[in-house]
């Protein structure tokens, strides 16, 4: 089973839908982590100090630093997997990533001669604590969903919802890497300058319009030298994998500060990502054709590539759900808020990478690129509350009778994502959760 898809990657035996693992939970139809996935994370058993690298298989983690596992790997790969973060492995490049994935797939397949010995390298996922998967030095957040950009534009700039450069440039802003948090960390309600509609002067106050944003995060593996752009045809060779990303947003702070230079305090207080990095290779079955309307401007030549048009779209479904404090107290399940797919994005991952570096900007291993809120064309596919509630004017009714315009203290947002395609096994991205807590206003 080998099918070339360009960008130096191809479908191979690791994608075979017939593969089964001797870890039985990996064979359950609803698992996020079948043997066809094998995402990586930084973890540590609860009560221990040092993080280490592991691969998910069903409800278990394979400790890649375990001697039995390390013995199955090439020495340079085994050495890179002894770290507390993925950066050293990321820097080895796509050939090493593929070799690691192949080695793990074969080791975890039913009938492997080492399976009894490898059981000692397993640890249950519910017995560990996760850290950020990589040392993330820089975070750039893009704006690739035209549906989100237009919907928010109608609320903020009804006279011109979509700015004229949107269809020409993959717009992004430079985010704050220091406030990135792994799933499960609390999110303190931010304070900032807010201008109330009836007042001329702004006030300093906690945000009253706290929102979430459903995004995909793209982690860079091999970087590029300063002054040497990454051509779009080579972009995926620099992508290590993806995570779920929630770019929490204070809409009232944002509305006052975002012109002329864009968001600042409204975004820099917290960004939540999932712990598991799903590899670019594992995502191959869920790539498909990308195009845009014929009457829209076509991308400039540096943003055009035949292979990107043939397989640049990423059909990853992203969902957001909520559990309020009242729901938690009465044991009610999470309520689904929305669901959409990254296939609706106006700009591709390869275009993001190519544009980010066209000026000579050098990316490094561990850099994070957010896709921006992934909203679809239908109202129920909106990836944020500002869209779902039309700027807070139309509150959402939750199953328990509560209503929400924006997030309240105690609300927990959970993002989930998965790829699903006939002929292949469904793979998931795990989850990215964060609970809003109150914070005293800083003066």
Image: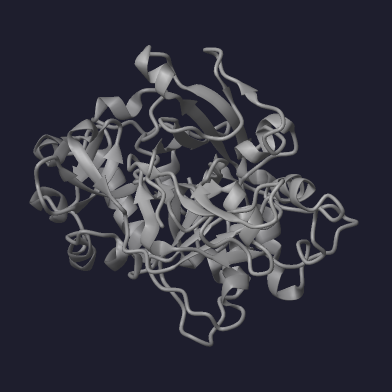
Residue 93 in the image, given as x and y percentages of width and height: 38, 68
Height in image: 226 above or below 150? below
Residue found at the very far bottom of the displayed protein:
227
The x, y position of residue 200, in whole percent, is 70, 56
Image quarter of the C terminus = bottom left
Q: Give whichever of 322, 224 is nearer the camera.
A: 322
Q: Residue at x 67, y 33 (%)?
A: 388
- Residue 267 lies, with reference to residue 63, above or below; the image says below
* Colouring style: one colour
Q: Is residue 291 left or right of residue 439?
A: right
- Quadrant hosting residue 135: bottom left
Q: Does 193 sit left or right of 25 as displayed?
A: right
Q: Which residue is nearer to you in this view: 378 or 30?
A: 378
Q: Residue at x 47, y 35 (%)?
A: 416
Residue placed at 38% from the left, 12% from the top?
330
- The answer to whether residue 175 is left or right of residue 89 is right
- Give residue 193's position: percent from left, percent from top: 55, 56
> From this viewpoint, which residue is outermost toward the right?
295
Q: Is residue 425 visible?
A: yes
Quarter assignment of residue 94 = bottom left
The residue closer to the viewer here, 439 or 185, is 439
């Amino acid at each position: 089973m080998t099918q070339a898809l360009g960008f130096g990657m191809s479908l191979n035996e690791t994608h075979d839908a017939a593969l089964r693992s001797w870890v039985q939970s990996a064979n359950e139809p609803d698992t996020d982590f079948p043997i066809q996935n094998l995402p990586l994370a930084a973890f540590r058993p609860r009560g221990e100090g040092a993080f280490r690298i592991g691969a998910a298989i069903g409800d278990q983690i394979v400790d890649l630093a375990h001697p039995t596992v390390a013995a199955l790997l090439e020495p340079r790969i085994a050495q890179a997997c002894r770290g507390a973060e993925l950066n050293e492995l990321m820097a080895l490049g796509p050939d090493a990533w593929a070799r690691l994935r192949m080695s793990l797939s074969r080791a975890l397949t039913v009938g492997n001669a080492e399976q009894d010995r490898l059981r000692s390298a397993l640890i249950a996922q519910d017995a560990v604590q996760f850290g950020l998967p990589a040392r993330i030095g820089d975070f750039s957040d893009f704006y690739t969903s035209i549906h989100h950009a237009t919907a928010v534009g109608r609320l903020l700039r009804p006279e011109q919802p979509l700015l004229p450069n949107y269809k020409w440039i993959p717009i992004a802003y430079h985010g704050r890497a220091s406030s990135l948090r792994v799933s499960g960390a609390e999110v303190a309600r931010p304070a900032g300058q807010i201008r109330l509609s009836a007042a001329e002067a702004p006030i300093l106050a906690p945000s009253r319009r706290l929102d979430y944003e459903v995004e995909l995060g793209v982690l860079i593996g091999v970087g590029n030298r300063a002054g040497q752009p990454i051509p779009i045809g080579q972009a995926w060779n620099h992508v290590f994998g993806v995570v779920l990303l929630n770019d929490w947003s204070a809409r009232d702070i944002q509305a006052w500060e975002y012109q002329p230079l864009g968001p600042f305090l409204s975004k820099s207080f917290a960004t939540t990502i999932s712990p598991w990095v799903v590899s670019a290779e594992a995502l191959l079955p869920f790539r498909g054709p990308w195009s845009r309307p014929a009457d829209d401007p076509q991308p400039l030549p540096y943003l055009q590539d035949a292979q990107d048009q043939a397989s640049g779209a990423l059909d990853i479904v992203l969902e957001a759900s909520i559990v309020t404090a009242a729901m938690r107290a009465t044991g009610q399940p999470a309520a689904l808020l929305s669901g959409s797919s990254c296939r609706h994005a106006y700009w591709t991952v390869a275009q993001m990478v190519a544009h980010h570096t066209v000026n000579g900007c050098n990316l490094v291993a561990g850099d994070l690129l957010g896709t921006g809120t992934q909203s679809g064309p239908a109202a129920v596919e909106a990836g944020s509350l500002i869209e779902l509630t039309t700027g807070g004017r139309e509150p959402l009714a939750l199953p328990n009778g509560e209503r929400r315009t924006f997030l309240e203290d105690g609300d927990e947002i959970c993002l989930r994502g998965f790829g699903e395609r006939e002929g292949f096994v469904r793979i998931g991205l795990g989850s990215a959760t964060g609970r809003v807590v109150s914070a005293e206003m800083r003066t």
